[in-house]
Image (cartoon, rainbow, N blue to C red):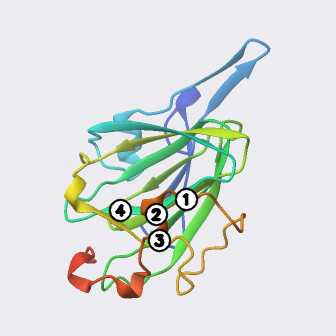
């Protein structure tokens, strides 16, 4: 647990260093609930960056898969959560030279579990919607730069993400994402 009193939160690391799972403290009764969804000091103490510069919302229907996306060289760390519905969220280490290169981690984010997933720069990210619809929220450590966008095939067999859906709905752009092995090494972020 991190923090004190009513604002304490559970922070977990994963098998891939840098990925952080946060379970905020939720206080509820018959009227509803209250939770602190972000506090710069507490989240910095948990290992997240101190500065987020952009907040994004995405609404998607059941079966839609968005990803795998990243931005390089102007990378973005993302603090992800779901405000409505449920998604399967995944992150893949694509940092050249990383001991966990090509490995992935996933978890369920939902409006029910209120869990958050921090994905640092250097990771490809994607999610698929499991509920009827989902409202996906993410805070970013960097601004969006169109020419720095990069995608990786959601079904790259070398990565092997165990997606819970077999035939997702994808954008035309995501349908054209290459396998990780087909992306030029100098186009990918480096492990430091």
Looking at the image, residue 78 sits to the left or right of residue 89; the answer is left
In-front residue for pair 156/104: 156
Marks 3 and 1, how far apart at CA: 18 Å
User: Which residue is rendered at x = 60% and y = 64% of the image?
Assistant: 106
Image coords of residue 88 (percent x, y): 64, 56
In-front residue for pair 133/16: 133
Between discs 4 and 3, the one toward the N terminus: 4
**For mark 3, does the 10 Å Cα neighbourhood hold few (<14), some (14 to 19), or many (20 or more) residues?**
many
**For mark 2, does the 10 Å Cα neighbourhood hold few (<14), some (14 to 19), or many (20 or more) residues?**
some
In-front residue for pair 174/69: 174
Q: What residue is disc 2 on? A: 174
Under tag 1, what secondary structure?
loop
Looking at the image, residue 165 sits to the left or right of residue 35; the answer is right
Q: What residue is disc 3 on? A: 92
Marks 4/2 in contact by CB < 8 Å: the verdict is no
Marks 4/3 in contact by CB < 8 Å: the verdict is no
Marks 3 and 2, how far apart at CA: 16 Å
Q: Nearer the viewer, mark 4 or mark 2?
A: 2
Between discs 3 and 2, the one toward the N terminus: 3
Q: What residue is disc 1 on? A: 170
Between discs 4 and 1, the one toward the N terminus: 4
Q: What residue is disc 4 on? A: 70
Marks 4 and 1, how far apart at CA: 16 Å
């Amino acid at each position: 647990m991190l923090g004190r009193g009513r604002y304490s939160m559970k922070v977990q690391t994963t098998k891939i260093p840098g990925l952080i799972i946060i379970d905020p403290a939720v206080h509820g009764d018959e009227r509803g609930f209250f939770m602190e969804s972000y506090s710069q000091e507490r989240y910095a103490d948990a290992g997240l960056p101190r500065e987020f510069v952009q907040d994004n919302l995405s609404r998607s229907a059941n079966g839609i898969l968005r990803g795998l996306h990243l931005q390089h060289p102007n990378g973005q760390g993302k603090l992800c959560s779901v405000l409505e519905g449920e998604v399967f969220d995944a992150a893949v280490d694509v940092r050249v030279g990383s001991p966990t290169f090509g490995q992935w981690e996933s978890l369920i984010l939902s409006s029910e579990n209120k869990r958050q997933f921090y994905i640092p720069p250097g990771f490809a990210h994607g999610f698929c919607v499991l509920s009827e619809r989902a409202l996906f929220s993410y805070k970013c450590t960097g601004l969006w730069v169109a020419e720095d966008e990069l995608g990786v095939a959601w079904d790259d067999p070398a990565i092997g993400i165990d997606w819970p859906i077999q035939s997702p709905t994808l954008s035309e752009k995501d349908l054209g994402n290459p396998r990780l092995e087909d992306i030029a090494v100098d186009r990918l972020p480096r492990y430091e």
